[in-house]
């Protein structure tokens, strides 16, 4: 395939900015596309000063919300990420990504409108490392992520293509989470510098909706797993946009996320006290040994010690890492965590931040079951790695899950996932089948306390009473290459088509 000119536009890119999976994907996908020989520039906000990025001297001006605003562009090129252009403006450079301790910023629509407008100009005018701008090499393929870049396909049509500019450019919009749509009062439309007849493109149920604008304006729509691509076309998962997605079904597809195998790889992970590979699950010399051996056993013991739990190899560790929101099934986790704490059949380690009510409930759970349940209410990347490595089982009772990365990390680390069979979880965790000794974990449905408890119960019973079966399953999960290779090819085919 001929080399493509790709402009990836995102609100997050790890390690510069990250609240969840978007940050990981927006970092890894451009690297994988670059490795395939495509030219990729990522455009993202400059939330704070990033010492490695330099002021390019290029200034852009946009009339938005009644004033002409000037943005500055900063640039860095790294081996891991390729070219990144950071969009700088006082409204953007405030420390937080979407908000602060008082909640979401009130001017997010403006902040991300600046991002979308800037990204198009970057593709036309920015010379990365002295080379020609993307648009000079050939048709630009905009890869826009979530609602934050959702205005870009609209601006591309309204400000450029209807005036004969960037006529051969195309846009592919990626839905990482349909629940976040960038809604605002319709009165904000007047601030967006679009002529009146674009209002209907952005209007949804009487409100302005950036994601809807992207869904009707983009050339193609992708989401992050095949099952989620089907689910979002139904009223149950469509978050009010299923009608539009059904109308555009021909251009909707699902491509499973890969993982960054340099960062999430137990053989080289620098956050772990010891590294390991699948050999830790080889048949042990003593048949009564249940858990893993070698480096993974060392990670488990170190994790128990770090979390203030009794260091014991004869009890399984169940881990959870993620945002504490309704989406992640935290109400189910809380109840099943209470059952686990009461039974003492496993140690439960929870890492997450999020809604106050869930933080309080989980803090209470760990107080109640001290020595059995620990909830660490923090965002701690190193600890996320150590929980993924040191746990025997990782739970994800998400009510919906577009792709989910933690179950992929768990599989790569020989940690058996117990998940709600939805979205990407259904696509990546085939449930254990005793007859054929197949499967990679336990997937339950529907999402309820009973089904979750039952699935976790099966996992624990298998750990205790059929350790060889459990070890084989964990080892199977580690076998496939879960890197970005195949998915990057799929994105390139879509962008090029
Ligand atoms: P989502 O994007 O919905 O938050 P994903 O499973 O796709 O869920 O990705 C979550 C990412 O964020 C993973 O890399 C996970 O390790 C990380 N993460 C979430 N919460 C925390 C936390 N409290 N500390 C460290 N990493 C976290």
Image: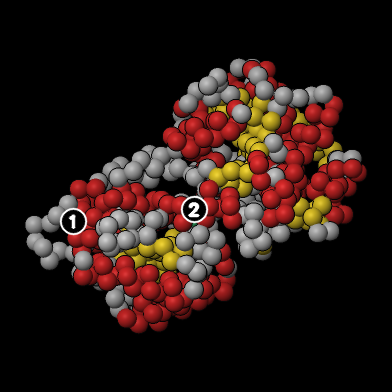
Q: Residue at x 58, y 50 (%)?
A: 229
Element marked by disc 2: helix
Q: In the drawing, what numbered circle is on residue 293?
A: 1
Where residue 418 appears, as percent x and y from the top left, is 39, 63
Whichever of callouts 2 and 1 sits on the residue coming sooner in the sequence is: 1
Where residue 133 appears, as percent x and y from the top left, is 66, 21
Q: In the rendered image, which quarter contains the C terminus?
A: top right
Q: Nearer the viewer, residue 463 or 155?
A: 463
> Where is 38 relative to 342, above or below?
above
The CA span between labels 2 and 1 is: 30 Å
Q: In the drawing, what numbered circle is on residue 424?
A: 2
Where residue 47 appears, as percent x and y from the top left, is 63, 45
Q: Quadrant of residue 221?
A: top right
Q: Nearer the viewer, mark 2 or mark 1?
A: 2
Q: Is residue 359 left or right of residue 468?
A: right
Element marked by disc 1: loop
Q: Residue at x 21, y 70 (%)?
A: 465
Q: Quadrant of residue 105?
A: bottom right
């Amino acid at each position: 395939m001929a080399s493509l000119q790709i402009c990836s536009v995102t609100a997050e890119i790890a390690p510069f900015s990250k609240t969840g999976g978007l940050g990981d994907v927006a970092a890894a996908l451009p690297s994988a596309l670059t490795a395939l020989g495509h030219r990729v520039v990522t455009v993202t906000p400059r939330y704070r000063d990033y010492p490695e990025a330099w002021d390019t001297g290029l200034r852009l001006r946009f009339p938005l919300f009644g004033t002409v605003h000037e943005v500055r562009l900063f640039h860095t090129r790294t081996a891991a990420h390729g070219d990144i252009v950071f969009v700088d403006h006082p409204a953007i450079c405030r420390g937080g990504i979407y908000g602060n301790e008082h909640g979401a910023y009130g001017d997010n629509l403006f902040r991300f409108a600046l991002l979308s407008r800037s990204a198009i100009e970057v593709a036309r005018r920015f010379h990365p490392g002295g080379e020609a701008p993307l648009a000079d090499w050939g048709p630009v393929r905009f890869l826009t992520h979530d609602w934050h870049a959702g205005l870009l396909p609209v601006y591309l049509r309204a400000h450029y293509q209807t005036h004969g500019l960037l006529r051969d450019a195309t846009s592919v919009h990626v839905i990482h989470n349909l629940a976040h749509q960038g809604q605002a009062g319709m009165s904000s439309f007047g601030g967006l510098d679009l002529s009146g007849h674009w209002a209907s493109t952005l209007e949804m149920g009487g409100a302005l909706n950036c994601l809807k604008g992207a869904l009707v304006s983009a050339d193609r729509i992708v989401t992050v797993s095949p099952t989620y691509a089907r689910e979002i076309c139904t009223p149950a998962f469509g978050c009010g946009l299923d009608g539009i997605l059904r109308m555009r079904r021909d251009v909707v597809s699902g491509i499973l996320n890969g993982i960054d195998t340099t960062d999430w790889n137990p053989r080289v992970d620098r956050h772990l006290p010891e590294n390991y590979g699948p050999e830790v699950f080889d048949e042990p010399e003593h048949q009564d040994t249940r858990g893993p051996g070698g480096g993974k056993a060392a990670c488990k013991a170190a994790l128990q010690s770090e979390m203030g739990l009794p260091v014991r190899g004869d009890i399984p560790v169940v881990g959870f890492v993620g945002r504490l929101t309704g989406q992640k099934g935290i109400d189910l986790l809380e109840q099943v965590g209470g059952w686990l704490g009461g039974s003492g059949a496993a140690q439960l380690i929870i890492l997450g931040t999020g809604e106050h009510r869930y933080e309080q409930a989980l803090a209470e759970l760990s107080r109640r079951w001290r020595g059995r349940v620990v909830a660490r209410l923090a965002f701690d990347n190193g600890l996320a790695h150590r929980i993924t490595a040191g746990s025997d089982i990782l739970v994800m009772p998400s009510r919906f899950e577009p792709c989910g990365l933690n179950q992929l990390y768990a599989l790569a680390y020989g940690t058996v996932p117990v998940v709600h069979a939805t979205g990407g979880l259904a696509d990546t965790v085939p449930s254990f089948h005793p007859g054929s000794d197949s499967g990679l974990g336990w997937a339950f449905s529907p999402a309820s306390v009973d089904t979750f408890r039952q699935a976790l119960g099966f996992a624990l019973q298998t750990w205790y009473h059929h350790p060889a079966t459990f070890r084989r399953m964990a080892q199977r999960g580690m076998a496939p290459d879960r890197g970005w290779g195949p998915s990057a090819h799929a994105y390139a085919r879509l962008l090029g088509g």
